[in-house]
């Protein structure tokens, strides 16, 4: 195992320049010399909003890269609106690091962006992992619960909002959520990283208007994770999600070759935070 600093420790924040003069903030840690795992954060997320266990556990075997998206928090530039533009911003960051081969992991909004990266640069991305997200475009879905929709739309979310959106309303789940918040505080208490209300509105509008990659799923010929499997598509989702219905993740698994879905029965949209060890184990099984 590499002695490199992990996210929960003193991993150094670095910067790299983009083609338009923007500066991307990122951290790179884990086992050097392996294919990097480049992550894409959730709605409202920054590189400090990953539960530290999620990148740290895979970093025992792989190099992991976390970053702030184009124009958000520690990265400079103008925030972009469309999913395709977010994917191109991620590719600009990837090119700036001269990464010719990488695996991508995206959670929630980041899961959609990760799909865009894989579609835009199929020769560069050998494996795709999608968590708490889908390709979109699934018809006849029920509307999300009113409280969940209202909570997502708030300019600022507090800890109780985090627990409601990401964890089922059960005592054990709440305890897991509070433990995750405590781990998140390791970085956030120092950085104070937050996505501002204007950027949140922009992200929400993007999600609301995006038609999805459903019609392009057959373009995925790489191993992908709609849940994690070797030589397959990996998509992971929680059965009790109040933000994203589980069915689109299942539907996505029917399109790419050798796809698999992970659907924990006791978790919601925050299932990787509820079961970080299990999720990290699935990631490690999926990656070579």
Image: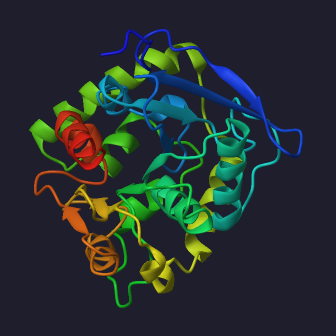
The outermost residue toward the right is 21
Q: Which residue is depicted at the point 56% across and 81% down? A: 211
Residue 102, compared with residue 260, is above or below; it is above
Question: On the image, which quarter does residue 25 sit in?
Answer: top right
Q: Which residue is depicted at the point 36% across and 71% down? A: 144
| Residue 104 visible in the current orientation | yes
Residue 83, compared with residue 75, is above or below; it is below
Residue 109, compared with residue 175, is above or below; it is below
Q: Position of residue 14 (x, y in %)?
A: 67, 21
Which residue is more in the foreground, 152 or 264?
A: 264
Q: Which residue is depicted at the point 11% across and 38% down? A: 171
User: Quadrant location of the N terminus?
Assistant: top left
The outermost residue toward the bottom is 140
Residue 37, compared with residue 219, is above or below; it is above
State the count of labels.
0
Q: Is residue 210 left or right of residue 184?
A: right
Instruction: Indicate how the structure is coloured in the image.
Output: rainbow
User: Quadrant location of the C terminus?
Assistant: top left
Which residue is more in the foreground, 91 or 171?
A: 91
Q: Position of residue 50 (x, y in %)?
A: 43, 34
Q: Position of residue 130 (x, y in %)?
A: 38, 57
Q: Is residue 44 left or right of residue 272?
A: right
| Residue 226 visible in the current orientation | no
């Amino acid at each position: 195992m590499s002695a490199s600093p992990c996210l929960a420790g003193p991993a150094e924040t670095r910067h790299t320049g983009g083609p338009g003069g923007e500066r991307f903030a990122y951290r790179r840690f884990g086992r050097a010399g392996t294919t990097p795992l480049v992550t894409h954060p959730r709605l409202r997320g920054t590189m400090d909003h990953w539960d530290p266990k999620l990148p740290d556990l895979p970093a025992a075997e792989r190099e992991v890269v976390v970053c702030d998206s184009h124009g958000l928090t520690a990265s400079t530039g103008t925030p972009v609106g469309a999913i395709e533009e977010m994917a191109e911003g991620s590719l600009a960051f990837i090119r700036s690091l001269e990464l010719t081969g990488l695996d991508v992991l995206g959670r929630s909004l980041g899961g959609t962006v990760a799909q865009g990266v894989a579609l835009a640069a199929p020769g560069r991305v050998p494996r795709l992992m999608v968590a708490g997200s889908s390709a979109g475009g699934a018809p006849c879905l029920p509307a999300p619960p009113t409280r969940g929709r209202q909570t997502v739309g708030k300019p600022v979310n507090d800890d109780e909002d985090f627990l409601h959106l990401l964890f089922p309303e059960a005592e054990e789940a709440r305890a897991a959520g509070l433990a995750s918040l405590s781990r998140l505080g390791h970085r956030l208490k120092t950085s104070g990283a937050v996505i501002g209300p204007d950027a949140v509105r922009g992200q929400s509008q993007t999600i609301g208007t995006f038609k999805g990659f459903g019609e392009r799923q057959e373009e995925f010929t790489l191993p992908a994770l709609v849940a994690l499997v070797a030589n397959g598509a990996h998509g992971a989702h929680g059965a009790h999600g109040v933000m994203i219905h589980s069915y689109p993740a299942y539907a996505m698994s029917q399109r790419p070759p050798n796809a698999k879905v992970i659907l924990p029965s006791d978790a919601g949209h925050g299932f990787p935070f509820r079961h970080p060890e299990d999720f990290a184990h699935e990631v490690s099984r999926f990656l070579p």
